[in-house]
Structures are given as C-alpha cells and as structure tokens.
Amino acid sequence: MASVLFLVGSTYGNAQQAAEDAADLLVKSGHSATVNDSPEADDLILSDADIVVVCTATIGEGDIPDNLLPLYEDVFDQKPRLDHIKYGLIALGDSSYEEFAGAGYLFKNLLHSLGAKPVLPMLVIDAIETPDPEEAVADWVASLEASLAG
C-alpha cells in the first residue's frame, strides 16, 4: 500500500476539507495518508512518501494561500532536484476570477521544473460549477488508486 502526504494551502477551509476527504478515502482503502496544513520546504524536499499531493486554494489574483506560500517560496529559491518525488495536484478556485486556479498552476510549473513526476493530471475544482468538491475528489482518488495498482 502507498503512503500519501497532502500539503495543504487553504484560507476558508475548502482545500483543507478536500485534502482530508481524499486522505480519508485512501485510508479506507488501506493506504496511509497524512494531511499537513503548515508545510515547510523540507516536508516536500525530504519527503519519503510514495506520493506528495499539493491541495491548494487560490486567493487574490491567482496567489498561493498564506500557509502554503513559505513552502513555495523556499522551494522556488532553493531549486532542489525533486526527481525522487511523485506528485498530484488538487487546485480549487473560482472561474469568475481571471487567474482561476492560479496557485495550482504555479505549483505545477515549479514541480515540473524541478523534475518531480506527476502521477495524474491536475484536478481543478471550480467553485462555480462544483460547490461541494467531495465527488470530484472521490473520482480523483479512484484514479489515483488505479494508477497505484497499475
């Protein structure tokens, strides 16, 4: 079974809830899952989890939430090789804003540039179309589990 680490950026709790829902589903399937809502750069860089999932809301003009921003800035500044990291991304946003899901795209670009390997395409959850992201998260977790099995 896989170990999954969720690094969460949340302002109003939606991304936190999405990460907790995903972690609960994984644990029910026999995997181990940890949710960290105060992540630091070393939580990513030194992770020994099988998969690291960044689950983030987007605030302001496409910005990363305050509790996840230090991780992003430190990793961006340090530019460590992350070839050993397999990752997933869950990005929450509101498509009525110009920089919809911007925080997710910032992380996607950063992780890609440092050699991390995506396990699935980024899940983008639009608050306009999906006010309760639980079903979208459940579908994404099912895809994640299928990729682990195959």
Image: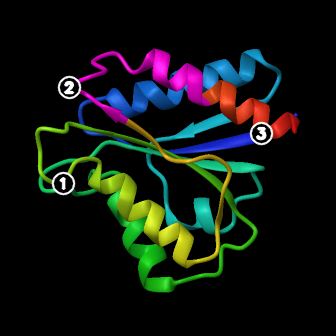
Asked if residue 84 lies left or right of residue 94, the reply is right
> 43 or 126, which lies in front?
126
**What type is the residue that disc 1 sits on?**
Glu
Identify whether 59 is placed above or below 70: above
Residue at the image position 18 percent from the left and 54 percent from the top: 99
Q: Which numbered disc flags the more N-terminal residue, 2 or 1? A: 1
Q: How many marks?
A: 3
Q: Quadrant of residue 93?
A: top left
Q: Which numbered disc flags the more N-terminal residue, 3 or 1? A: 1
Give the number of the disc on residue 147: 3
Please tell me how crowded label 2 is: few (under 14), some (14-19), or many (20+) other residues with Cα within 10 Å: few
Helix, strand or loop under label 3: helix
**What type is the residue that disc 3 sits on?**
Ser
Residue at the image position 48 percent from the left and 15 percent from the top: 135
**What type is the residue that disc 2 sits on?**
Ile
Q: Which residues are magenta?
A: 125-140
- Residue under numbered circle 1: 99
Asked if residue 21 lies left or right of residue 97, the reply is right
- Residue under numbered circle 2: 128
Please tell me how crowded label 1 is: few (under 14), some (14-19), or many (20+) other residues with Cα within 10 Å: some
Q: Quadrant of residue 8?
A: top left
Identify whether 107 is placed above or below 14: below
